[in-house]
Amino acid sequence: MAWYRNPKPWLFLLCLYPLARLFYLAATDGLGVNPIEFITRSLGTWTLTGLLLTLAITPVRKLTGYTGLVRYRRLLGLFAFFYGVLHLLSYLWLDQFFDWAAIVKDLWQRPFITFGMAALLLLLPLALTSTQAAMRRLGRNWQRVHWLIYPAAIAGVLHYGWLVKKDLTQPLIYGGILTVLLGLRVFAFYQKTKAG
């Protein structure tokens, strides 16, 4: 079977690229002058990228009419959560060395940490209910649980925006993409309500 008939394994490998890149840069002394910050930010960036790609599946499907994209939504969502967990672990371990008093202080005093933690907590139920068995068990409630991706993505963009102190170009790009994706959903909901 040609690779393009079943691109899912290739997409899986592609989703592992950011992690492989970090290992390669670590092995070749390419993480820069602040390797901990580089690792943490890179993992956070890929978390947000995965979230936005997951959110883009439905609008792209509706615009192109290609329904096959839906098959990759779960994979992209789980990788977003995977990188989010690694992002959190890099903060807890590499940055704070599991100093829980300092972590609690960060949560209290630094809003971007609070929003980042909130985003990951909102993604946790999505990851836990991503299986076919969970879909069957939850029935219609499954869709309601997975609406949590919207506040999670918003919290993720706010986390990124608060983190960056000088050049806000990237957070604004992510925020703009998220605004477009959410706007398309609001428009589709309005059209459906109007038609009904």
Image (cartoon, rainbow, N blue to C red):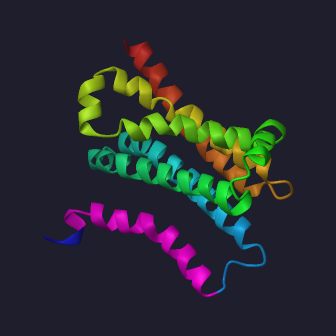
| x then y, percent, for residue 83 | 52, 56
Magenta stretch: includes residue 139 = no
What stretch of residues is rendered in magenta? 4-28
Find residue 67 and report its image quarter.
top left
Quadrant, the C terminus: top left
From the viewer's perspective, tell me whether residue 102 is left or right of residue 27.
right
Residue at the location (77% across, 73% down)?
34
Question: Outermost residue, top direction?
Answer: 196
- The answer to whether any part of residue 64 appears in the image is yes
Residue at the location (77% across, 51% down)?
163
Q: Compared to 176, does 39 lie above or below?
A: below
| x then y, percent, for residue 127 | 42, 41
Per the picture, the main secondary structure of the magenta-coloured stretch is helix
Residue toward you, 36 or 70: 36
| x then y, percent, for residue 14 | 41, 68
Residue at the location (79% across, 54% down)?
164
Q: Compared to 129, does 162 lie above or below?
A: below
| x then y, percent, for residue 170 | 71, 56
Quadrant, the N terminus: bottom left
Q: How many numbered marks have been drawn onto this rendered protein structure? A: 0
Residue at the location (49% across, 31% down)?
185
Magenta stretch: includes residue 9 = yes
Residue toward you, 15 or 122: 122
From the viewer's perspective, tell me whether residue 5 is left or right of residue 187.
left
